[in-house]
Amino acid sequence: MLAFYLPGEILAMDAIDSKKHASTAKVLETSAICDIPYDSVERLSRLIPNLQVHLYRLLS
């Protein structure tokens, strides 16, 4: 990966099913990330239907 171009881009969705990542990422300059465990996203998406719709859009 060379860059994230927009805020909110997502990395590591490849591990949802297998719990193993097929790729890695290395930070080359000062960066900020937000690590959100997938079980937390699942729990919230049950409470907030629009979050689940947005997640499906990202996955497609």
Image (tube, rainbow, N blue to C red):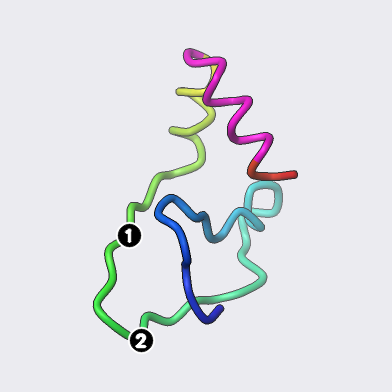
Q: Give the range drawn in magenta.
A: 47-57
Q: What residue type is labelled 2?
A: Leu
Q: Mark 1 points at which residue?
A: 33
Q: Which element type, helix, strand or loop, lies under badge 1? A: loop
Residue drawn at (64%, 48%), measured in percent from left and top? Answer: 16
Magenta run includes residue 56: yes
Residue 32 lies within the magenta run: no
Q: In the current view of this chain or complex, which residue is farthest to the bottom?
A: 28
Q: Which residue bears the numbered disc 2?
A: 28
Left of 13 or right of it: where is 38? left
Circle 1 residues within 10 Å: few <14, some 14–19, many ≥20: few
Residue extending furthest right?
Answer: 60
Residues under numbered marks 1 and 2 in contact, where contact means CB atoms less than 8 Å apart: no
Q: Position of residue 10 (x, y in %)?
A: 52, 55
Disc assigned to residue 22:
none
Residue 35 against residue 3 in the figure, above or below: above
